Amino acid sequence: MKNKIKYIKLFIIVIIFNACTGDFENINTDPNGISQESLTQLNNHIGSRFTPIFANIIRTEPAWNYQLQHGLNGDVFSGYMTSPTPFAGNINNQTYALVDGWNAFIWIDAYDGSGGNGVMPFVREIKNQVAISNSAGGEKFVYLANIMRVMAMHRVSDVFGPIRYSQFDDFDTTGKYDSQETAYKAFFADLDQAIDGLKEFEGNGQFIPFDQSQLGGDIASWRAFANSLRLRLAIRVSNVDGNLAKTEGEKALASDAGFLTSDMVINTPGFRHPIATISGTWNDICMSAEMEVILKGFNDGRAERYFNAPADASLGDYKGIRQGIDITSKSQYASHSLIGAVVDTESKTWMTVAEIYFLKAEAGLRNWAGAGDVKTNYDNGIRASFTQHGVANVETYLADNTSTPNDFVDALDAANNVTYGSDVKIAFDNSATNESQLEQIITQKWIAMFPDGQEAWSEFRRTGYPRIFPVVLNNSGGAIDTNIQIRRINFVNSEVNTNLDNVEEARTFLNGSDNGGTRLWWDTGSNNF
């Protein structure tokens, strides 16, 4: 009886939705129009819903939306970039005075299905359309949508912790939250189902017209992406639930789906990478202090791709800015290194082959079956990154066992100078402790994942690597410890104002108060081994 009621509701919802999309009767009789029957035959009634999903996992346009979704949170908290602009009188995210109006866009781009936003509502619509149409093979679109949903929502969960996920599709419970542990287990279940379910559709071309990635609608490649994502999430939970991590990780390592053999890149023709606008046009984001000291200390050739020389030649070849310092005007630091050719593209990257090698290297360090040799994977991760960016002399780089990160010297104010926290080196040290080897792996993984600050911030919080410098000005009012650094973002006001009861319940799932100082479920703060 419950299922009957559910499908009656579903039927009514889809009828209402279709009634709002136009006068289909006129279209059906228009010889120059496209009939609903034709739309159904071409799967456009399903496939068109993928467009906003692709658009909102990492937002491309407008650039200011990306700036609020990722640029002024994950990209700066990760130690990748720093803004020279003293937004709101320098009382902003970079000094730990979290700006709800900015951070709300992380949530809006996931949940608000209007104004070009939305991931979760459109995944639900795909499921509804497949259920109503009952077309043969329609389930493959559900599997693909669920892969994309996991890609989107693990990032949102890695910002807030608890999220609305497993109960979102039922309108009676759509506002209810999962704890982050529950959400992650649901991610694994969705990925497992998709990887297994899509196997019978390998070679099927029905997703080709709707696939905006460079995978070109190839189902086997989407299975490989889902499996690569499963390994990412398995590593993510390794400190908090070793058994779950190993089970899911070894499942990924043994899967016939394999892993990505080329980077997971989303095409955005006609739209430049938003960081190119934010940095190159607005001068609102620059090289970080951490990127400067690591890349220059390692004499890393990727610096030429990642950053431009400073406008002020007296600053040298590359010059970064420390996060959370006293900035009174944009002109102070605006002549420092802007972001380089790496963002001179009409695409965005969700995952790289380099990351997969580093995931396998850490899996090997944790003795997961099928991971392969740790050093081989580490070296191959660096090789893949150099190849991705067209940088030469990788073998010389791999053999460098003396270079270490520099200390940071502020160009304008010595009070911002800071010593780098370790002498981590490039050449992999097979004789070192697991912890030292992990620092090498994560430091190189951090370099390779640039400019995806969201993932880099998550890995820093999970492992403590690389050594991100603490802010100088902490305007959190004591909510965020300067040395422990920011761990999450509080639930946004739009949710508090419209979904308070469920937000209050979600707050009980946290390991502390609803503020930026509380660690997420997988962020244990304990030893990595």
Image (tube, rainbow, N blue to C red):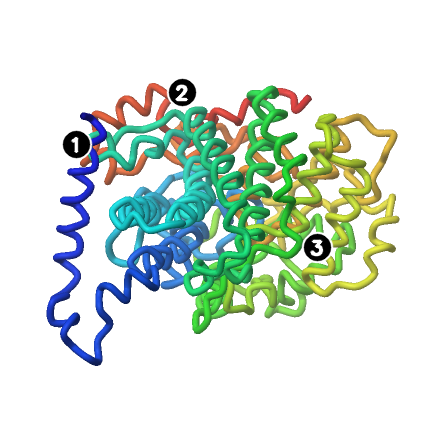
Residue on which disc 1 sits: 5
Residue 428 lies, in percent from the top left, at 83, 40
Q: Amino acid at mark 2?
A: Gly
Please determine whether, in this image, residue 355 is positioned above or below residue 18: above
Please determine whether, in this image, residue 222 is positioned above or below residue 364: below
Crowd band around label 1 with a 10 angstrom C-alpha radius: few (<14), some (14–19), many (20+): few
Which tag, 1 or 2, sits closer to the chain's start? 1
Residue 385 badge = 3
Crowd band around label 3 with a 10 angstrom C-alpha radius: few (<14), some (14–19), many (20+): many
Alpha carbons under labels 1 and 2: distance apart: 39 Å
**Foreground tag (1 vs 2):** 1
> Would you say the residues marked 1 and 2 are in contact, meaning their CB atoms lie under 8 Å apart?
no
Residue 427 or 233: which is nearer the viewer?
233
- From this viewpoint, is residue 73 visible? no
Crowd band around label 2 with a 10 angstrom C-alpha radius: few (<14), some (14–19), many (20+): few
Q: Quadrant of the C terminus?
A: top right
Residue on which disc 2 sits: 512
Residue 3 lies, in percent from the top left, at 23, 30
Residue 190 badge = none
